[in-house]
């Protein structure tokens, strides 16, 4: 029994490369005349099977399926994780001060009061996140050169400025609307908080003593929000203790 029969056809180019139309080639035949000058072909014949022809041509790279392209086109353009980080949810613990007035009055255990306090807490979480977004947009150029703040989403370019401003506006409107639904007095305190924090971001933060007073005022307004949400009358002692406590806290951090 004879072994497999192998016929090879190869084409070699002699001389410098030339345009396809003027290409001069020399055919080297091994075993049999070439049947196709455009490809390299190997015919393998087995004793009990017809010969198979293997053609080596251009390599084709697989194309991604159309479904993956559609999924890529539908990918969200708003970085939600960066937006959540820019809202600084870890700072929401400061809004626990809304519990101060109803807790001091001894009415925090009432079901209706608990709901009002919870609404005030959510309201100030939205308002404070709106002010954080506005502050980061205003300070984005300075934050890029600060080793401790360059990782903030807006300064790092992870969150577009337009998205941050739109989110800040939406959070501010949602917070005021929720406050007005609880009590109009709570909405008034919320508007005052937005005005105070915006003034701090734009002007007062560069004025000595005024910057400390503005930050301390934010803590006092949180305590007033709890009283406004539950209609708790405030005493002078409560206001004095809250104000001086906030001043000492802020001055200690500076």
Image (cartoon, rainbow, N blue to C red):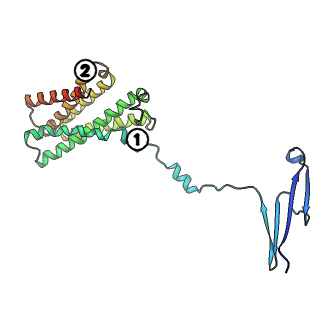
Q: Where is residue 114? Give x, y as percent.
A: 15, 46
Residue at screen point 15% across, 36% down: 228
Number of numbered discs on residues = 2
Tell which of 240 and 6 is nearer to you. Answer: 6
Q: Is residue 188 visible?
A: no
The single residue placed furthest to the top in the displayed view is 208
- Give the secondary structure at mark 1: helix
Label 1 packing within 10 angstroms: few (<14), some (14-19), many (20+): some
Q: Earlier in the sequence, mark 2 or mark 1?
A: 1
Q: Which mark is residue 82?
A: 1
Quadrant of image for the N terminus: bottom right
Tell which of 213 and 131 is nearer to you. Answer: 213
Q: Where is residue 233, by image quadrant? A: top left
Quadrant of image for the C terminus: top left
Q: Where is residue 108? Give x, y as percent.
A: 11, 44
Say whether residue 39 is left or right of residue 152: right
Residue 43 lies, with reference to residue 21, above or below; the image says below
Say whether residue 192 is left or right of residue 1: left
Q: Where is residue 12? Give x, y as percent.
A: 87, 53
Q: Where is residue 104? Give x, y as percent.
A: 9, 38
Q: Which mark is residue 253?
A: none
Residue at screen point 24% across, 19% down: 209
Q: Where is residue 17, by image quadrant? A: top right
Q: Are marks 2 and 1 in contact (CB under 8 Å)?
A: no
Q: Which residue is mark 2?
A: 210
- Give the secondary structure at mark 2: helix
Residue at screen point 91% across, 61% down: 29
Residue at screen point 41% across, 35% down: 151
Q: Is residue 106 visible?
A: yes
Disc 2 from disc 1: Cα separation: 31 Å
């Amino acid at each position: 029994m004879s072994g497999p029969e192998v016929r090879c056809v190869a084409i070699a180019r002699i001389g410098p490369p030339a345009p396809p139309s003027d290409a001069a080639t020399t055919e080297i035949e091994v075993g049999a005349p070439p049947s196709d000058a455009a490809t390299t072909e190997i015919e393998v014949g087995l004793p009990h099977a017809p010969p198979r022809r293997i053609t080596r041509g251009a390599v084709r790279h697989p194309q991604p399926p159309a479904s993956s392209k559609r999924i890529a086109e539908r990918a969200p353009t708003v970085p939600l994780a960066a937006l959540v980080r820019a809202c600084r949810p870890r700072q929401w613990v400061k809004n626990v001060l809304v519990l101060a007035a109803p807790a001091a009055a001894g009415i925090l255990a009432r079901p209706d009061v608990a709901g009002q306090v919870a609404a005030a807490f959510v309201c100030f979480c939205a308002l404070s996140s709106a002010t954080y977004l506005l502050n980061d947009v205003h300070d984005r150029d300075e934050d890029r050169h600060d080793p401790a703040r360059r990782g903030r989403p807006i300064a790092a370019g992870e969150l577009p400025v337009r998205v941050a401003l739109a989110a800040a506006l939406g959070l501010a409107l949602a917070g005021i609307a929720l406050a007005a639904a609880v009590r109009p007095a709570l909405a008034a305190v919320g508007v005052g908080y937005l005005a105070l924090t915006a003034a701090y971001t734009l002007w007062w933060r560069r004025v000595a003593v005024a910057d400390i007073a503005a930050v301390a005022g934010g803590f006092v307004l949180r305590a007033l929000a709890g009283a406004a949400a539950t209609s708790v009358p405030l005493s002078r002692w409560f206001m004095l203790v809250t104000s001086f406590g906030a001043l000492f806290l802020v001055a200690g951090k500076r």
